[in-house]
Amino acid sequence: MLPPLTVEKRSLGVTFSGKNQADVLLWAPTPEHVAIKLTESSEVIPLNKEELGYWSVQTPKIKPDSLYTFVLDDEKECQDPASLGQPEGIEGPSRAIDTTSFQWEDQNWVTPTLENYLLYELHIGTFTPEGTFDAVQGKLDYLKALGINAIEIMPVAQFSNARDWGYDGVFWYAAQDSYGGASGLQRLVNACHVRGIAVVLDVVYNHFGPEGNFLEHYGPYLTDKYQTPWGNAVNFDDAWCDGVRRHVLENALMWFRDFHIDALRMDAVHAIKDAGPVHILQELRQQVDRLMKTTGRRHYLMIECDLNDPKYIQPLPEHGYGMDAQWIDEFHHSLRVTVGEEKTGYYADFDGIASLAKSFRDAYVYDGQFSEVRHKLFGSKAETNPGSQFIVFSQNHDQVGNRKQGERSSVLYSYDTLKLMAGAVLVSPFIPMLFMGEEWGETNPFLYFANVSEPKLAKEIKQGRKDEFSTSKSDVEVPDPDVEETYQQAKLEWELIQQKPHRTLLRYYQTLIALRQQLPALHKLNRQQLDVTTCDEQQTLLLHRWHDDQHVLCLMNFSSEQQDVTISMSASTMHWQKLLDSADQQWQLETGSSTAPNSLVDSTSVTLPAESLVIYACGHEKSHINVPKPIPAHLYQ
C-alpha cells in the first residue's frame, strides 16, 4: 500500500523506521521492473509495484551508510532520485543516511520574526579557505558580532566535482559531499542556532541540471509542454505530474524537519510552469503550514521572482500563493543606476534616483508602467504587502557573478559610494541582505564557475558565457568557468580586514547595522510610515521614516559635489540629533572632509558632503546608538 505524504517523516528514497529495517519507496512509472542493488555485496532486492507509479520494499539488509543503486528493467543501474548522499560523486552509488540520528542542541531555538531578519548570503565553497560546512562554523561568531542573524546559503544540492555555484543540481536531496554532506550541514545549522543565527537555504525547483541527469529513466520529471531557459520545464501539471510534485514537497519538508532549516529561498519561481488547479507553491505553503502546526517551529518561504506580481506573496485566503517574502532586483537596479551604472541591459529601464525613490515607497518600480526592455506594460501594485515581504541588497551572487569580470562594488565605485550604498540598503523599509565580504570591501571577483566532468558540456558552458557578453565593449576575455583559477579567485580574502580601508569599512557596516537594529523607526518595516523626497538636479534623496513618537531622517547625496538639502517644514520643526555621518572623520580615508551639523533645530537646510549619508533621529528614548565594540581579530583570522 502506497504510504501517504505526511509532514512527520520523509518517505521517498531510503528511510529508517527504528525497527532495524529500511523502508524503500521509489517513484518510477516508466520501467516494468525495479530492484535495489547493494554495492558492497552486489545483492539485488526486487521492489514491489504499488499504485500511481511507486515501488516499495522493506528490508533489514540496508543499513545507515550502505551504498546502493536502483536496477531498472534488469539492466539499467541508476542513482536514487531522492539520494541523501553521493560520496563518490554524481556518477557513483547513493548512500543511505539516517537523518534522525543527529543529536540536536537547538531545542530552545526560535527563528527571528521575518521583519527582524538581517541576511548574509554566502557560498560554502568560497566563504572560507577550506570551503566546508564545518569551516563556516569558525566564522559564525564574527557574523554575530557584525550583527547578522540569518545566513542565506547558496544551493548545496550535490553537483559534479567540488567547484560550482550549485544551481544546476539533479540530486535535490543530497548535500554536497565535498562540503561535508548531510551531517556537516546538520552540524552547521545546529551551531548557527546555538549562536542565535537563522539559516536560509537556496533551493532550485525550476529545472534539473544537465550533467548526470538520469531522471528520464524513472519517469517524466520534465515536460515539453513548456520551455524554460534551461529547456523542457519541470513537470508540475502534465501527465504523471503527481510524482514530481511529491518529489518537491517532500524535499522542502525534509530541509525544514530533518535539517532544521529556517527558510527556503526558491530560485527563479517565475520559471515554474504550473497551470493546475492548485499551483505547486500554494501546495507547498499548505504542507509547510501543516508541518509548523506539528512541530511548533516557524519556517519561511522566500522566492526570487521576476514578475512583479503580488499574487506570489499574497496569503492563501486572498487567492495568493502564500510566499513569505521575495527578492527585489529592482531596488538593486535603481540603486546601481543612481550611483553611475550604465543604462544598458536590464538597467535600461531605470531612471536612477527617481526609480530608487519609487522602490523605497512601492517596492516594485514597475507596477503597471510600460517597460522599454520588456516592450509591454509590466507589473502590479503591491500596496498592502508589508516591508517584511521584500528583500533588498546592493549586490548578490547574481549581480556580481553575472558581470563579465565578476567585479564587486568595491572595484567599481569609490569608497564613499560604498558607504552610501550600504546606507541605502540598511535604512530601507525592507529586509536587508549583504553578500559575503561586501562589509569589508572584498576585492576578489566572484565569477561564475562550474567544474563539470563532461568535456562537451564544459565547452558549451564556456561558449555560453562568451555569447552572453558578445555585445560587450570590452576586449577582455571572459574567464573560463571550468578552470581552477576562476574558482580560487572567488575565495574571500579574510586578511584584508586587518588593512585600511577594509577595517574602517567593516566598522562602518557594524555601526550602521547596530543603528538599524536599535531604532524602532528603522527596524519596524511599516511601508505606510515613510516619506521620500528627491531632487534630480542635485542627485539627493531624503527618506523620512517613523514609528510611534520616533522619527528618523536619512539624507543621501549621490552626486560628486556637496549639496545643500532643504528639509520640509514639518520635519525641520523637530529637534534632530545626528546619529551617523558617512563623511565623519572616523569613516574617512584622509583628513579634511566636511560633515553635516550635529543637530538640527528649526533648520530647513543641511549641507551634505559629496557621496554621503547622514542619519538624524528625534523622539523616543532610543534616538541614539549604542555602538558595539570592534570585532576582535581572532574572530576573522
Image (cartoon, grey):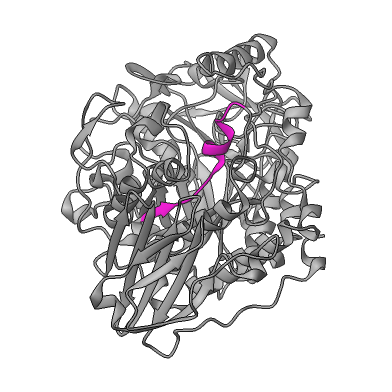
Is residue 115 or residue 534 the one in the foreground?
Answer: 534
Q: Is residue 191 visible?
A: no
The part of the chain drawn in magenta is 390-404
Is residue 150 or residue 286 the one in the foreground?
Answer: 150
Is residue 392 or residue 48 the one in the foreground?
Answer: 392
What residue is at 77 percent from the left and 48 percent from the top? 493
What residue is at 42 percent from the left and 45 percent from the top? 338
Q: Quadrant of the N terminus?
A: top left
**What is the x, y in percent for residue 263?**
47, 55
On the picture, is 299 further left or further right than 513? left
On the picture, is 177 further left or further right than 414? right
On the picture, is 410 further left or further right than 604? right
**What is the x, y in percent for residue 70?**
61, 25
Q: Is residue 625 above or below residue 143?
A: below
Q: Quadrant of the C terminus?
A: bottom right
Q: Is residue 80 above or below residue 132?
A: above
- Hey, which quadrant is residue 2 in on the image? top left
**What is the x, y in percent for residue 407?**
62, 36
- Hey, which quadrant is residue 568 in on the image? bottom left
What residue is at 62 percent from the left and 59 percent from the top? 189
For residue 395: magenta? yes
Count of numbered tags? 0
Determine the residue located farthest toward the top in the rendered image: 456
**What is the x, y in percent for residue 405?**
63, 29
What residue is at 47 percent from the left and 15 percent from the top? 32
Q: Is residue 540 above or below residue 96?
A: below
For residue 224: magenta? no
Q: Is residue 238 visible?
A: yes
